[in-house]
Amino acid sequence: MSAATSRPTGRRRTRYRYSPALDGVRGTAMVLFMAFHFGATWLQGAWVGINLFFVLSAFLIVRLLVEERVEWGRIDVLAFYRRRARRLLPALFLLLVTLGVVGVSAASDTVRRPLRGDILATLCYVQNWHLITRNDQYFQQYGNPSLLRHAWTLAVEEQFYLVAPLLVAGLLVVLRRRWMQACAVLALGVVSAIWTAHIGVASAADQPHAYYGTDTRAQALCIGAALGLWAAPRPRGDGRRRLPKAAVQAGGWLGLASVVYSFIAIEPFSPWMFDRGGMYVFALGAALLVLACVDDRPSLLQRILGWKPFAYAGRRSYGLYLWHWPVAVWMHHSMPGAGTLQRCIVGTVVTFAVAVLSYRWIELPVMRGGVRALVPSSLRVGTRATRTATAVTLVVILGLSFTVGQVPSSAQVANEAARGAVPLVTGQPSYKPRTPHIRVALLGDSVTYYMAQRFPQKQYPDMRISNLAVPGCDMMNLPLQVSKDRTSPNQSDCMALKKNLGSRIRAAAPDVLVIFWGSLVAAPHAEPDGHVVTLADPKYRAQVVGRLNAIRATARRAGVKQIQVVTVPCRTTNDNDLPANLGVFLKNPQSIVDAVFDPVQTNAVLTSWAHRHDAPTIDLYGQLCRHGYVPKVHDVELYDDGEHFSLAASVMIWTWLAPQIRTAYAARGQTTEAGS
């Protein structure tokens, strides 16, 4: 993953010999990391291996910076940044352009929607903080994770590169002895570990920060930087005693054992890794391994890790890292029934093919000769033109990011409907607009959100849809109980919706409010005292009814004439086909899984409440799930991901849903629900 290389390039040459073992460590770890994302769940601790990359990258960068300071008397900071840009940006630009084009032309809406922010955040190397702000859960890998989720590590490294020259220069001035400098950086790593423990992982709200944060990952970077300081050349009068070869190699084998153990044995979000310094300890193990690999005394460990296939993968690890995650997401959508072995083989072959081509034709030429090296010598032009080409590439990336992030346009929806929307109900009569026109507001989660966005306005000119839904929003105020020791509170935009629901309804001024609740209401929730409640508990059912009453009261005060309720459709229980917010609940007892994915209990509560308040019920569950979960209706794929309806399915469902809403409003009008 790390783009730092043990064979430095650029204007100044290094005294360090190339270490195949270092590339071998990086390549082997990268292949295992890829296998984990391709479905090899037995590598459950591959996430710990990220620390190995951070340690290695910080070590190489700091060692080169110190060498430059010792040899030349100064650190050329601008030249350092230019070298980093040459190494990092060409392959990254290629990835962003490719994902932008795919997002615009082929990706489903639920995959495409977050790409705008992700491309911009990746380009600016702040993707880790971008993921933190939207509460992205790394270990919820199914459904529609960001195609650029993995770019968080690039952001952390680039943020380190930004301060590394200044940090090194400052330490070399303030502290004279190298062991003092190394200890100072190790102490910063301890501070990071203590801060990580303070953040903790007990709550799902804290986990993204603990996992993605630059401040929490700094402990591994500090350990690598300390090793780089200690191992770098010294000025005269600052000698060091060389460690015995046996001690170095023993430490290397110990470090290798710790890395192997971490890949296999450490579970996701093991509390002791974050709360009791486990990340720091395993980063120290990685440092021992790195030290043994760069020792100039040959050893068995170096021969094993320096094996040519391992080193070959290591030299291309940056490209492998960039491309493996989009390939994994692609396989998830295109090969939903494939087994782990098939995914690993296909994913590895495709990723290596792309990474090797990128390295041969993009990365290596630019490292050696700059951007001009990408152009045949007979066509090469001046520096100004190459800068212009770079600027054009940036403009293309920015343009794609703004285009790809758009939800389906009205033209796309109209085109889908114009192609001849398949009626959901066979023999359903064609829709005839009525008067007066009505305004409809939809309230719910991401399923509702996309349905509102995909309303085919031209087919139903007598209806106007307002979208009050918030993706991922749980209508209940209690936090979700994600697992035995993890909760997930309401997201900020969801809380804002519930807090300002009255004003948002008044702004939309709907005649009808359609409550289109999602599956999360049936999931376990945690009360303030820690007690976990489900729909099997009368107390929790009463709270659900209370939320419905509160929504009804707010809607009536805002002038809504009628409330309608849509039943919740069933969902698949295939883990590979589910988005993260639902897939995580498959690990619960079967009774809870059944309640979430076949929401009979949820719909019983909804329909009972609707009957008491004379609110029309639109039975979407009955239309889609009368024979259980089905992936297709009339040869139309219902779902993008097992939960969200596809564009074609959305338009098909509206052929039934829009007349239902209109008929219910015409039949009951203003005199029933609003006055009940």
Image (tube, rainbow, N blue to C red):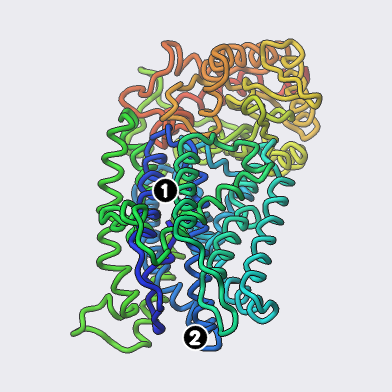
Q: In this view, does 45 lie above or below 160?
A: above
**Quadrant (top left, top right, bottom left, bottom right) of the C terminus:** top right
Q: Which residue is drawn at 66% across and 79% down?
A: 176
Residue at 54% x, 22% y: name it. Answer: 587
Rendered image: mark on residue 411: 1
**Where is 293 relative to 546, above or below?**
below
Q: Which of 41 and 183 is in front in this view?
A: 183
Q: Which of 375 and 317 is in front in this view?
A: 317
Kind of residue at badge 1 = Ala
Residue 107 % position (x, y): 38, 46
Picture quadrant where residue 653 is located: top left
Q: Specify the quadrant of the image occupied by residue 516.
A: top right
Provide the secondary structure element on which disc 2 rests.
Answer: helix
In the rendered view, would you say 380 is above or below 418? Answer: below
- Pointer 2: what residue? 71
Name which of mark 2 and mark 1 comes first in the sequence: 2
Residue 179, image x, y percentages: 63, 69
Q: Position of residue 325 (x, y in %)?
A: 40, 47
Which image quadrant: the N terminus?
Answer: bottom left
Please, is residue 341 above or below residue 145 in the view? above
CA gap between label 2 and label 1 equals: 63 Å
Q: Which amino acid type is shown beneath numbered disc 2?
A: Glu
